[in-house]
Amino acid sequence: MLKSFYISCIFVLGFQVICWSQCTPASETNCEDAKVLCSLTELNGFTCRLSSASNTAGCMPICPSGGAPENIEWWAFISEGGNVTISLTISNCTNTTGAIGMEFGLSGNCICSESLACNKLCNGPGTYSISATLNPCKTYYLFVDGCNGDVCDYTIQTSGGNTPNLFPLGKINDDADRIIPVCRTCDFHHFYVKHQSNGCTPNYEWTINGIPLGAHENSIETRFPEEGDFQLCVTAYIGNPQSGAICDQEGPECATIQVRQIPDKTSGIRYLCPESIPYKWHDQYIINSGVYKTKLCDKQTCYFDSVVQFQILPVPIIPKIYHIGCNSADVFIDPTSRKVFKTCQIETPILIKKSSYPYKCDSTYELTAIFLNQEVTFREDCQDGKIIIQPRILNKAITCGSNEIFEYRYKWYLKQDTNKTSISTDEYYTAIQKNDYCLEIELITTLGPLTKTCFFDYCENLDESIYIKPTGKFSAYKTVCSNDTSCITFRPAYSGLIQGYEWDITGGTIINPNPTQDSSICVVWNLPPGQKGKACVYYKTLCDNSQTSCIDITVGTSIREIAGSSKTVKGLTSNLEAILPGGVWRKVSGPGFVTYNDPFNPITEVKVSKYGIYTLAWTVKSLGCTTIGYVTIRFIRSEFKGRFKNQNESFLKYDPDEIISPQSFQYHISKQIKNQTLILQLSSTVNQTAKVSLIDLSGKIVAKSNYSIGTESLSYELLMNASSGIYFLTIQTEHDVISERIVITD
């Protein structure tokens, strides 16, 4: 309640009188600094005049519907709660821009997020009211503000909001004798006093032995890590002790807390398996047998000392086990885990979990295992008119270097003989007639103390008659220009001793000094364009002469290495570097458009519209003959992180072996193309998909397929409809792209 009211008057010109009180209780310019009044009634009848000083310290907006502070003033108060009404009478407003009045409101905090009532109508002089329902003992904040900075006389009238009163606290934890026994704890103990029955929520101050605990609720969680007697007290108050405004207080209410530790707990001997050492036991590691002690908590979170005797068991003897697998299917299976071992092992420790009796410790044995595998190919040779069948035995046993010993024994028999009657026990067999022969290899293997005999059967499928008149294959360019020099290589099918070659050239001249001793010759072709030449050859062996093989050579167009090196570049621009003048550049294949700086210049710049693989041709016409060179360029983005295999010229002439090793996979091209099928051998460091395409010089895809490849090398067949000519083989995975130029001849 307002205790006193002082009136001062100043007489100014015109005899106008302006009166104001001493504005008590004083307001604050900041909400947080407002002193807490013990009731709303202390503001009843408050009369003052707004300050003209600018003060924008407040909420934005100050009312939920808007408004900004201009010369705002704040009060804070508590009450017994319930319904309240606050009226504001406004008069004598002044402002250089035109006075419009005041705004005022009530909030549960200083950021106005708990606005209870607010009036920002700014309707000029008059009396305006706001109403709200308050909680007991809660601090509320009242503000007044001049609209657009108006300076006005105002009077506050209140209804409700009387001073709250606290009830006695009652005993801590309702303990009658105020002595509370607890154990020495590793967790928190709960202490409380009952809530105020009138709904008031005061501030509480808890102390132990006079030391504040920083808790301000009616309950507290605290721990007592040490033994002893402690004085726990609690005091309740309403108001703001920092500003000296304590409106009511109860307490202190105290209790004696008796803290005691429970007795030690001892268990029997605990046996530890050697594989568990060092064994972590709570806060320490067990590395030796003995008695150990540690501090623990029970289910009631009370401290106790746990005392345990640990006994470490000895390490069991490790046996050695040996295994010889006759083939990849003859695997070793662990008898306990059923784990399958199909790769070589050398004294590999095999763990058997919890297998010992009676303590269920782990045990171990050392496994040494090898897996036999033979690769046998047969070679037939002719000596003194007899055919000698020679087995080439490649021991591909998976051994890991286990110091194994191999002993071989042989038995030859006829394939059609189901009884496998022996016809020879020599390593080589001399055939006296054409037939199908088989070889049984008896392999006696010794590994450590273990000896095992395995049998392997292989049958040859060679045609002995080819050694009477064996043939071969050519590798050569089949198109040349007049007076061109081209080289021809003949690869005999016969693998024995060749005594010499007989070459016959139609339309050309051999320039080798001694062609009868060479399987490769070079020929100058002196035919006019449009004519065909021919190269024929047979060779001499100990048995007989081979059949004559021939290859046709067409005069008119020559494919030569004149277009420069194939390469991979970053970006969409590259340089072309042909080695013969007088030609023109053209695009053979590629995903986008190609622009040449000068298509008639052998050394020029080329730009493409899209990233990818492009094949370009440099064509030179001279003296009635056309010479063509091809170059492959891969244009990639600068941020590409894969890896490309670049080779200037890689040809597949009569399918020679070609192995490429990119970053993530390998491929191998078979030596044979049969029935329009190209055999690829693919493997990868990771499981991935390989996209394989065969592209002709016009850019047309003549064959394509996708293969799922993994770490095991497997054969894949690429079906194609390709005649003799130049093609590009591309293999693309997630990490690599390979492009190889191949030449397929008859």
Image (cartoon, rainbow, N blue to C red):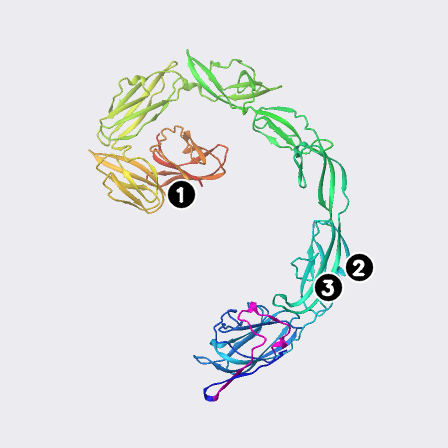
Residue type indicated by callout 1: Phe
**Disc assigned to residue 177:** 2
409 is higher (above) or lower (below) than 523: above
Q: CA distance from mark 1 to mark 3?
A: 72 Å
The answer to whether residue 667 shows anywhere in this view is yes
Is tag 1's residue or tag 3's residue first in the polypeptide sequence? 3
Q: x, y percentage for residue 627?
A: 25, 34
Task: Magenta stretch: give its range.
Answer: 15-43
Location of residue 690 with respect to 164 vertically, above or below: above
24 falls in the magenta region = yes
Asked if the residues shown at circle 1 and circle 3 are in contact, with their CB atoms under 8 angstroms apart, the answer is no
**Total of numbered circles in the picture?**
3
Closer to the chain start, of discs 3 and 2, is 2
Circle 2 packing at 10 Å, graded few (<14), some (14-19), many (20+), is few
Distance between mark 3 and mark 2 Cα atoms: 17 Å
Which label is found at residue 640? Answer: 1
User: Residue drawn 29% across and 18% down?
Assistant: 515
Query: Viewer-proximal residue, 309 or 515?
Result: 309
Q: Amino acid at mark 3?
A: Lys
Mark seen at residue 194 = 3
Are the residues flagged by discs 3 and 2 in contact, CB closer than 8 Å?
A: no
**Where in the figure is residue 18, as x and y percent of width and height?**
51, 84
Is 507 left or right of 88, judged from the image as shown?
A: left
Q: Is residue 249 left or right of residue 325?
A: right
The mark lying in front, picked from 3 and 2, is 2
- Front of the two marks 1 and 2: 2
